[in-house]
Image: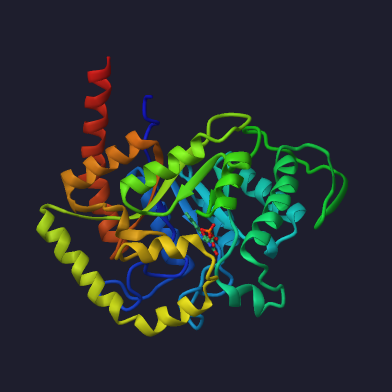
Amino acid sequence: MTPPPIRFGIWALVHGSRAALRDPDEPYDASWDRNRRLIQEAEALGFDSTLVAQHTINPHHAPQDQLEAWTAAAALAALTERIEIIAAIKPYLYHPVVLAKMALGIEHISRGRFAINLVNAWNRPELEKAGIGFAEHDERYTYGREWLSVVEPLMRGRTLNHDGANFQVTDYTLRPADPYRARPRIYIGGESEPARALAADMGDVWFINGQPIEDVTALINDVAARPRTGPRLRFGLSAFVIARATEAEAHAHHMHLFALASRDIEIRMVQHANTDPKSVMAATMRRTPRVGSNGGTAAGLVGSYDQVAERIVAFNQAGIETFMLQYQPFEAEMRRFAHEVMPRVRRLTGAAERAAE
Ligand SMILES: Cc1cc2nc3c(=O)[nH]c(=O)nc-3n(C[C@H](O)[C@H](O)[C@H](O)COP(=O)(O)O)c2cc1C
């Protein structure tokens, strides 16, 4: 099968640095101003997408700043022209009718560039301390599935009648509907069995945590083989990139970030205690030493410019379309990636296309 065209995205810095919180080369900054500048620059550099994660309180270290995802996504939509804006959403935090209305609003502001990333939560205090309660892992997915079955038709502009275990919606229609396409895109983030089933049944794109290519290939094979109505499911990968002129330099920076990250050990212990023990994502992250969130460097995008480009192409051949990337220090490494790795990937994929002709 011909691999899908590669798209590059960046994780917005909604809770500051991704690898280590105390880095003299990247002072902690989760502000709106930084994120505005960052996403505008990413767009100018040729990135196709940005993922704005959603946390009401900082999941790593509660006293630290946390950018609010949906207000930031709406503002980013107004300030950019081309880049896709994905805002994450945890179903327990918003009634689905309200969320569908907000998604359509940002779809209008962005002129057809908005997407939601449905995620079912791992950080207990965020929901518990709000009095919402933290349901058991699979129950959260059951709730999320019903929630999405309300959001999806409403985003399509359909009139909805829904009588379910959690929501009762009668003769409900949202206007204006989406004038750009059928509805905003739906990403699903999560690795457990109910997450995979949800992605196969109701997602447009499944986001996979960064991990070695054999594991990613097995996950894609599993989920792509499931019965499904509608267009083929697409795949995204989260990964932390360290690309340098030589493999040795990349390795040295990786070790430097490991050393910095080890200073956060007490913070990480609190985070570990707050994490749902049934989170498959957390289990995956424990398997391979790494820096960065959502798999981080476990995806192996650490090496020379050529090595990183070749590995990206290998993931693409396994079925990955969107690469949602992290760096540290973010701005400088993002520029380096755009200048050094993107052209190499383009050369490799161009050569593969010419060979296939
Ligand atoms: C690409 C990606 C993005 C995610 N973004 C968020 C987020 O913004 N907020 C959040 O609370 N969890 C986020 N998660 C974590 C999921 O909510 C979920 O808790 C986690 O994957 C554990 O579920 P699992 O057992 O199905 O893997 C994300 C997961 C992935 C793969």
Q: Residue at x 12, y 54 (%)?
A: 247
Q: Residue at x 64, y 59 (%)?
A: 138
Q: Position of residue 182 (x, y in %)?
A: 66, 33
Q: Give the number of marks.
A: 0
Q: Residue at x 36, y 52 (%)?
A: 41
* Residue sitting at the far top: 357
* Residue sitting at the far right: 170
> Nearest the camera: 299 or 326?
299
Q: How is the image coloured?
A: rainbow
- For residue 303, say whether it is visible: yes
Corner quadrant of residue 95: bottom right
Q: Position of residue 339 (x, y in %)?
A: 22, 46
- For residue 78, say whether it is visible: no
Corner quadrant of residue 74: bottom right
Seen in the picture, residue 57 relative to 74 is either above or below; the reply is: below
Please state, as top left, top right, bottom left or bottom right, where the C terminus lies in the image.
Answer: top left
Side of 189 where 292 appears, left or right: left
> Nearest the camera: 213 or 60?
213
Side of 189 where 236 appears, left or right: left
Seen in the picture, residue 196 relative to 133 is either above or below; the reply is: above
Q: Position of residue 143 (x, y in %)?
A: 71, 57
Q: Residue at x 31, y 51 (%)?
A: 212
Please state, as top left, top right, bottom left or bottom right, where the N terminus lies in the image.
Answer: top left
Q: Position of residue 23 (x, y in %)?
A: 28, 76
